[in-house]
């Protein structure tokens, strides 16, 4: 496929941008990666995603597809001759989508809250994050059925949905000086996290933890400055 | 046990989404009314993570989250498809389903709150309706084109429940002259076969939601 036929608008720190990149790697599909500059949104982004003005956006033969997990499904359906990303059984698909929605809506927002939390509030949100990881450990054991990934022998939809958050999970552990993913408590997930992160389809698009920490610290500083200015 | 059970509650739009999909596809099922003020052990077993309805149980296996249930039904019973077959068109449908899932609840915040919080929720609801009016509906009869599709079902809260919310709180949000396309769609949707014979009674809902709002504000 000519690179000009497939473009991905994104930014390196975004876990959501990682998702279509991993999916395209699994399918061995070439694409042009267009990085958005911080602090400003390109004309192409504003035209391609007028409703949300957010990345990632996949542009395939001029047509934009938005929302990271929707893009992953589109990639799976369009390049159907490559390795499958969604499970083949409808029930397994429903379970994968259930947990994908869970990590997006219920679990990940707590990492953001943790970055600026203090005292009792900090302890509380740490507890919530760890409880979520316990649930995900159970889910991993049930869904993987003894294999390496949520997707079984190969990376699948839920590996991508949850795995994209690992960089920020590790960065949060450093920034807040707390262990969240504990191999003693969630051994399955801890092992999966390492295997996933070093997978060929993932390792080149997973941002380095130290870079995320630096970026995360600058975001927290901005947030605190804005809060002080408005109070 | 019936092959398919739908666990829901009669005033819930999320319950109805699944009910309509089952009826549109002609899938036989047994309906189980749940009491959310006193959650049954069965519900907690079927949906331990969220403890919510609707839950679809197929051959003993539970599926949760209404729009995920709808995709499951569409894949398992392909007759009267709710999703188009083209991957790009499917991505557009899923985009709007996600949009209404993310933004739709602002109407329920209007229902649950008062004062400044409610004012903000009204603004959010208006923005949501504006986006749908301008970007999602086009000149088609339904979001799904000639036939009801996934987005129509997802947006059904706007067609039938929003009116109840508006009456309970005394604030008009979906004004016909501001949202002509959406307003026309609400009428078309509610007159569609199967939908029109399967809508919760609005008078009964008014009583139910009025009482619920009074309780909420009293305990706030």
Image: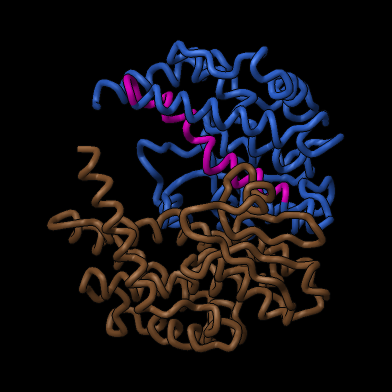
Chain colours: A brown, B blue
For the question of whether residue B87 can be seen, the reply is: yes
For the question of whether residue B61 can be seen, the reply is: no
**Which segment is the magenta one?**
B92-116
Question: Which residue is drawn at the image coordinates 38% and 24% (left, top)?
Answer: B118
The dominant secondary structure in magenta is helix
Query: Quadrant of residue A188 in the image?
Result: bottom left
Question: Which residue is drawn at the image coordinates 62% and 48% (left, top)?
Answer: B67
Q: Is residue B94 magenta?
A: yes
Q: Which residue is more in the foreground, B65 or A182?
A: A182
Report the quarter where the C terminus of chain A lies: top left
- Above or below, B14 against A219 in this view is above
- In the displayed image of the protein, which residue is found farthest to the right? B146
Q: Give residue A30's position: percent from left, percent from top.
A: 74, 78
Question: Which residue is drawn at the image coordinates 62% and 84% (left, top)?
Answer: A154
Residue B28 as seen in the image, left or right of residue B200:
right
Q: Is residue A143 magenta?
A: no
Report the quarter where the N terminus of chain A lies: bottom right
């Amino acid at each position: 496929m000519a690179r000009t036929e497939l473009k991905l608008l994104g930014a390196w720190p975004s876990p959501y941008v990682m998702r279509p990149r991993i999916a395209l790697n699994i399918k061995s599909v070439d694409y042009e990666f267009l990085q958005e500059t911080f602090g400003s949104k390109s004309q192409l982004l504003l035209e391609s995603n007028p409703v949300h003005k957010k990345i990632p956006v996949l542009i395939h033969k001029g047509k934009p597809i938005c929302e990271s997990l929707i893009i992953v499904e589109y990639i799976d359906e369009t390049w159907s001759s490559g390795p499958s990303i969604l499970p083949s059984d409808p029930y397994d698909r429903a379970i994968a989508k259930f947990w994908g929605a869970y990590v997006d809506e219920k679990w990940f927002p707590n990492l953001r809250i943790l970055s600026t939390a203090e005292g009792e509030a900090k302890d509380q949100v740490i507890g919530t994050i760890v409880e979520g990881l316990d649930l995900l450990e159970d889910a991993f054991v049930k869904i993987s059925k003894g294999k390496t990934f949520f997707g079984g022998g190969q990376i699948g939809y839920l590996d991508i949905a949850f795995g994209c958050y690992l960089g920020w999970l590790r960065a949060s552990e450093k920034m807040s000086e707390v262990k969240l993913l504990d191999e003693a408590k969630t051994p399955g997930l801890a092992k999966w996290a390492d295997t996933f992160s070093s997978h060929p389809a993932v390792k080149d698009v997973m941002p380095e933890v130290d870079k995320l920490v630096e970026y995360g610290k600058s975001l927290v500083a901005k947030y605190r400055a804005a809060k002080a200015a408005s109070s | 046990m019936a092959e398919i059970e739908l666990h829901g509650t009669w005033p819930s739009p999320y319950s109805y989404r699944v009910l309509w999909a089952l009826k549109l596809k002609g899938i036989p099922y047994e309906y189980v009314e749940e009491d959310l003020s006193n959650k049954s052990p069965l519900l907690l077993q079927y949906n331990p993570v969220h403890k919510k309805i609707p839950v679809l149980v197929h051959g003993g296996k539970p599926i949760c989250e209404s729009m995920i249930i709808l995709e499951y039904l569409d894949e398992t019973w392909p007759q009267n498809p709710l999703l188009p077959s083209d991957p790009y068109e499917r991505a557009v449908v899923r985009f709007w389903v996600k949009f209404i899932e993310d933004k739709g609840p602002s109407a329920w915040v209007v229902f649950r709150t008062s004062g400044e919080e409610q004012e903000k929720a009204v603004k959010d609801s208006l923005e949501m309706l504006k986006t749908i009016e301008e970007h999602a509906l086009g000149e088609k009869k339904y979001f799904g084109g000639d036939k009801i599709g996934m987005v129509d079902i997802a947006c059904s809260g706007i067609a039938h429940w929003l009116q109840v919310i508006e009456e309970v709180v005394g604030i008009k949000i979906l004004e016909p002259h501001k949202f002509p396309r959406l307003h026309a769609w609400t009428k078309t949707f509610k007159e569609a076969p199967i939908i029109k014979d399967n809508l919760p009674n609005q008078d009964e809902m008014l009583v139910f939601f009025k009482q619920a709002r009074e309780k909420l504000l009293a305990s706030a």
